[in-house]
Image: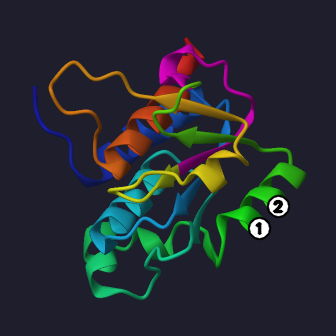
């Protein structure tokens, strides 16, 4: 076994994409994700899983930002993104475009992320690192999902949570 590099990696990924086209159109909505490094990592996740766009709202830092750009490794210039002052206007527009709004948040009605039958068009809403998705934004969401935890920690970093659900939508949901 040997590690692949450069053109060989590109060929492998291109062949995989041809054989496994995406089943879902995914948008990520960042509701006041505060730390630039997390936002940069969200751009990397968005690139890795071919998200339609990243919507930044509230206090979420936006490009150009040195810490965001360093973490994003240039993906902020490849992934479509836009900024809107409030998640309310973003959600209204996405719903009008046929997206189901899904919060990644632990709520009284949340289901495990793998138990939801996701629609073709889904917007995954992630919130502030300490406070999560606000109740106001949750009231606009159609559904909420959570990631079950086996350890003592109650949650994962916001970009890690987004990556888990995006990976599920790209790979597991195809089974």
Kind of element beneath mark 2: helix
Label 2: which residue?
93
Q: Is residue 15 visible?
A: no
- Please tell me whether residue 83 is drawn above or below residue 101 in the rendered image: below
Quarter occupied by residue 24:
top right
Quadrant where the C terminus sits is: top right
Q: Residue at x 63, y 46 (%)?
A: 138
Nearer-the-camera pick, 1 or 42: 42
Seen as rendered, the residue at the extreme right is: 96
Q: Who's the residue at 48% across and 31% down the image? A: 16
Q: Which residue of the protein is positioned furthest toward the top in this rendering?
A: 175
Q: Which image quarter holds the N terminus? A: top left
Q: Which residues are magenta?
A: 110-125
Callout 2 crowding tier (Cα within 10 Å): few <14, some 14–19, many ≥20: few
In this figure, which residue is indicated by the disc labeled 1? 89
State the residue at coordinates (46%, 73%). Answer: 60
Viewer-side residue, 130 vs 120 = 130
Disc 1 on helix, strand or loop? helix
Q: Is residue 122 magenta?
A: yes
- Residue 6 shows up from this direction: yes
Q: Where residue 91 appears, x then y in whole percent?
A: 74, 57
């Amino acid at each position: 076994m040997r590690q692949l590099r450069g053109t060989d990696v590109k060929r492998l990924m291109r062949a995989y994409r041809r054989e496994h086209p995406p089943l879902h159109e995914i948008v990520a909505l960042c509701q006041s994700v505060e730390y630039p490094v997390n936002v940069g990592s969200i751009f990397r996740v968005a690139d890795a899983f071919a998200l339609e766009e990243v919507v930044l709202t509230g206090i979420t830092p936006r490009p150009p930002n040195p810490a965001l750009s360093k973490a994003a490794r240039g993906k902020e210039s490849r992934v479509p993104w836009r900024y809107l002052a409030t998640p309310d206007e973003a959600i209204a527009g996405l719903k009008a475009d046929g997206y189901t709004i899904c919060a990644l948040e632990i709520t009284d009605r949340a289901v495990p992320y793998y138990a939801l039958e996701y629609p073709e068009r889904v917007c995954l809403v992630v919130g502030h690192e300490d406070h999560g998705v606000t109740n106001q934004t949750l009231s606009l969401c159609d559904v909420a999902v959570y990631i079950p935890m086996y350890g003592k920690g109650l949650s994962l970093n916001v970009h890690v949570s987004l990556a888990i659900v995006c990976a599920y939508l790209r790979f597991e949901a195809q089974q």
